[in-house]
Image (spheres, helix red, strand yellow):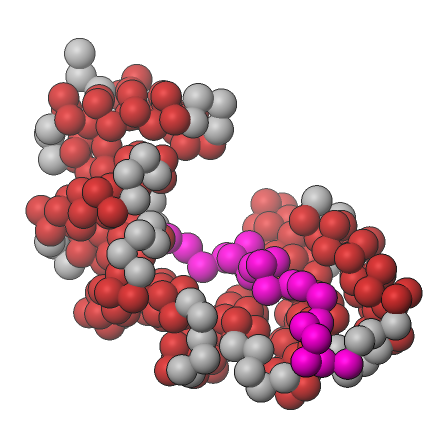
Amino acid sequence: MKRAALPASLLVLAGLAPAPPALAQSPPAAETRFSTGVMHLREGRYDLALDEFKKAVKEDPKNPYFQKGLGLAYAKKAEALQRAQTARGPGGASPVGEWKDAIACFRKALELNPYYVDVRNDLGMALISSGDGEAGKKEFLAAFSDPTNPAPEISARNLGTANLEEKNYAEAINWFRASIGRNKAYPDPYLGLADALVATGQVDEAVAQLEAGSRESPGEPVLLLELGRAYQKAGRFGEARARFDEVIKKDPAGEFGRAAAEQLKALPR
């Protein structure tokens, strides 16, 4: 099965928004810089995003949203450098400095607004990506335990994935189940849970969990794809074909549709 990884790409943009009325209004020029930075970040222009967020922070260093934006830009740049380093081997630009800067920005955002809980998820991911797994998990746990957290299922899923990457399978299973318990329609923890169950020899239970996820989130392509792969491994080829066909119909030109088409080629006729 496709393991649910914990890349920096999970650092979310959803938490980036103009400061709410309860906070002091930033100068209009800073808000414009911030909005432009978000646009560049969404479109993958990380250096331009960094430039805009730095200027926004210079205009208003006490805005936690600006600090989070700058942290995300550093994290995305670090992720890009990591991918390039993996592709070419040792040498070249290192992402270490960018990870340090990202961590510093996220910590500053939390210092400015301790209730900005989703920044703890970003900070945890940056810490793990920089090599400090224990500190990263502590941030996820703090986020999950915070009663103001609007999406504890994400924090629990992150804890599950971090433990899965460390091969702490029993702990991973517990956290993925906790994530599902908070939001049964959230597809990600079903994928991680299935991987952890397979790793511990519980293949039938892994299939059952993917089936449950598909019922809770009907039509979710990634769940259908992974369920098809699970059926294929179990020798249930007719059911696998049906799931792959369904994925292709729902995502004909997308990543999941293409993967399903490749899987179909490997199925016995």
On screen, residue 80 above or below 111: above
Residue 172 visible in the picture: no
147 or 91, which is in the foreground?
A: 147
Q: Tell me the quadrant of the picture where the N terminus can be found.
A: top left
Query: Which residue is the extreme one toward the top?
Result: 269
Q: Is residue 148 magenta?
A: no
262 or 245, which is in the foreground?
A: 245
Secondary structure that dominates the magenta span: loop
Residue at screen point 22% across, 22% down = 241
On screen, residue 85 above or below 155: above
Residue 248 visible in the picture: yes
Residue at screen point 13% across, 47% down = 208
Query: Which residue is the extreme one toward the front?
Result: 21
User: Percent position (x, y) of residue 187?
Assistant: 33, 50
Q: How many marks?
A: 0
Q: Is residue 44 left or right of residue 126?
A: right
116 or 257, which is in the foreground?
A: 116
User: Percent position (x, y) of residue 258?
Assistant: 43, 25
Residue at screen point 78% across, 57% down = 35
Asked where in the image residue 152 lies, by quadrant, the reply is bottom left
Q: Is residue 85 left or right of residue 37?
A: left
Asked where in the image residue 12 lies, by quadrant, the reply is bottom right
Q: Tell me the quadrant of the picture where the C terminus can be found.
A: top left
User: Percent position (x, y) of residue 41?
Assistant: 71, 53
Asked where in the image residue 72 lies, by quadrant, the reply is bottom right
On screen, residue 198 above or below 53: above
User: Percent position (x, y) of residue 130?
Assistant: 56, 71
115 or 6, which is in the foreground?
A: 115
Residue at screen point 59% across, 45% down = 87
Q: Is residue 18 magenta?
A: yes
Which residues are the magenta region? 4-24
